[in-house]
Image (tube, rainbow, N blue to C red):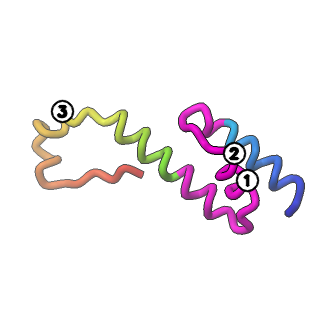
C-alpha cells in the first residue's frame, strides 16, 4: 500500500481516537484495508454516535413536525 495512504489513514485514526478507543489490532486492519471501507465504517459510526449524543430528544418529542418526519443520524 502506498506510504501516503497509510500516513493519511494514521492522521484520520489519530483524530478518531479522540472520540473512541480502538484496539491496536483493529487499527492495523483499518489501515491495511485496500478500499478504505473499514475506515469509512468507523467514521460513519462515530458520526452517528455524535449526532445521537447532540440530539435534544425532549425537544424533538414536542416539535410538531417530528411526529410526521424522521431524523437520520448519519
Q: Which residue is mark 2?
A: 24
| Of pointers 3 and 2, the one earlier in the residue sequence | 2
The answer for how far apart the CA atoms under marks 3 and 2 are is 39 Å
Secondary structure beneath label 1: helix
Q: Residue at x 78, y 48 (%)?
A: 8
User: Quadrant of the image for the N terminus?
Assistant: bottom right
Residue stretch rendered in magenta on the structure: 15-43
Q: Gap in Å between the C-alphas at discs 1 and 3? A: 41 Å
Displayed quadrant of residue 14: top right
Q: Nearer the viewer, residue 49 or 65?
A: 49
Task: Answer left or right for 9 relative to 39.
Answer: right
Residue shown at 18%/33% (left/top)? 59
Q: Is residue 24 left or right of residue 4?
A: left
Contact (Cβ within 8 Å) of mark 2 with mark 1: yes
Find residue 9 and report its horizontal and vertical position in percent: 74, 49
> Rounded to the nearest whole Å, what is the CA distance between mark 2 and mark 1?
6 Å
Question: Which percent across, then down, holds residue 34?
Answer: 74, 67
Q: Which residue is mark 3?
A: 59
Q: Residue 25 location, x and y as percent?
A: 68, 51
Amino acid at each position: 500500500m502506498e506510504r501516503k495512504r497509510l500516513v493519511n489513514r494514521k492522521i484520520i485514526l489519530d483524530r478518531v481516537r479522540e472520540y473512541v478507543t480502538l484496539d491496536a489490532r483493529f487499527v492495523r486492519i483499518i489501515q491495511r484495508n485496500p478500499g478504505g471501507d473499514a475506515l469509512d465504517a468507523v467514521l460513519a459510526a462515530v458520526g452517528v454516535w455524535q449526532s445521537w449524543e447532540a440530539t435534544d430528544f425532549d425537544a424533538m418529542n414536542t416539535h410538531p413536525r417530528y411526529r410526521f418526519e424522521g431524523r437520520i443520524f448519519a
